[in-house]
Amino acid sequence: MPEVREFRLPDLGEGLTEAEIVRWLVAVGDIVTVDQPVLEVETAKAQVEVPCPYAGVVTSRHGEEGQQIPVGTPLITIASAPVPDGAPGSSGSSGTSGNVLVGYGTAATAAPAVRRRRTPPLTGTVPLTSGRPAPAAGPTAVISPLVRRLARERGIDLHTLRGSGPGGLILRADLDRATRPEPGPEPAAATRIPLRGTAGAAAAKLTRSRAEIPDATCWVDADATELLAARQALGEPRISLLALLARICIAALATHPRLNASVDTAAREIVVHPDIHLSLATQTDRGLLVPVVRNAGTRTLQQLHDEIGRLTEAARTGRLTPADLTGGTFTLNNYGVFGVDGSTPIINHPEAAMLGVGRIAEKPWAHQGRLALRQVVQLSLTFDHRVCDGGTAGGFLREVADTIESPARLLRHLRPAAISGAHHP
């Protein structure tokens, strides 16, 4: 009566506990030889062929392609059958593999067998061995099918390796050592920069902004030639360009208050702030800082100039207080100082928008029906799309651009002797 054996999914090594059946390589009724791959499985590490340690006739298959199965699950049932002369597994083979699969070793009484693989292999890779007998000391200690597959792919004869595992078990590390190139110079160690202090706080805020705020950006080019001329006409002491841009930004927020807002996610409400507290993105040796000009909407142009100067100097010298860095409702970011034309800045959470100003550079421009060289600046507005749509954002940005191109309507009341008395246009 034929002996019936059940072959189960062996231990695949490296802590793997399950695999997915990718493809059956044998069908019921097929004759298999010792160590013939009977199916392909995919683990969390790789896709491998699983060889059967028994020879005989496949009487049943267990599991369907695409099914996840744990280690120890029956794969196929084999009934012993005569193996034709000259076929792998003949010539005195006991019908079991001499190779040790982890958790499924051959019986202690089994004699070392000639380890053969059917030819050609289904994968088209080089066979593991040349068909010679295993060393007299005992069978080659081979672990998971993953190791077998790696050995085939690398052209390694497992009989030439001395395993470093228990009882001479061949591990993946043994294959790696066998194919490791000659050691070269040690790679330079990576420089690690801790994210703590100012940098850590900025990183956390930027991450939260990107995670919570569905932002969008619109931009426009503007002719800043007249703005620079107006600044020159104001005389001395010179008002900073950033103060002029702040005044223009504040005026546009007065007519587009929806952008001077934040979102209360818990209450599902948009909070429109009655006062404008203007945040200023400032690059320092300590990283990016964003001090706040409080009540910017009520300050004169000269007061804006003075407060911006105070905050900028305090940021550079490390003298900003916590009150100087909190409570902003809208951010002005002059990244033009870095010599760049445009950017898509990340919103300063929990604010709803940020106006970015690029460098002012001489460019060809259509002016009064003719092509001329003009001082051109690119403006970008990044806004929280929950707070407003593109119409509101575009209207705000267009007003800023128009005022930059024709600043007289904003600055018409300003003269060198009356700068300190300036207010809203």
Image (cartoon, rainbow, N blue to C red):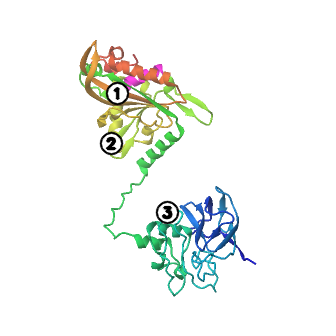
Is 41 magenta? The answer is no
Which mark is nearer the camera, 2 or 1?
A: 1
Rendering coords of residue 46 (x, y %)? 53, 61
Q: Residue furthest top?
A: 369
Label 1 belongs to which residue? 378
Q: Is residue 324 visible?
A: yes
Residue at the spot 48% in from the left edge and 65% down from the top edge: 125
Q: Distance between the residues labelled 3 and 1?
A: 60 Å
Check disc 2 and give the amino acid type.
Arg
Rendering coords of residue 336 (x, y %)? 32, 33
Image quadrant for the C terminus?
A: top left
> Dot 1: what SS?
strand
Left or right of residue 365: residue 149: right
Check disc 1 and give the amino acid type.
Gln
Residue at the spot 56% in from the left edge and 65% down from the top edge: 49
Front-most of residues 61 and 275: 61
Q: Distance between the residues labelled 2 and 1?
A: 26 Å
Left or right of residue 398: residue 133: right
Up/down of 81 relative to 327, above or below: below
Image quadrant for the N terminus?
A: bottom right
Label 2 belongs to which residue? 316
Which mark is nearer the camera, 3 or 1?
A: 3
Q: Residue furthest front?
A: 85
- Please tell me the numbered disc located at residue 124: 3
Q: Which of marks 3 and 1 is nearer the N terminus?
A: 3
Q: Identify the magenta region.
A: 243-256
Which mark is nearer the camera, 3 or 2?
A: 3
Badge 3 density bin: few <14, some 14–19, many ≥20, Cα 10 Å: few
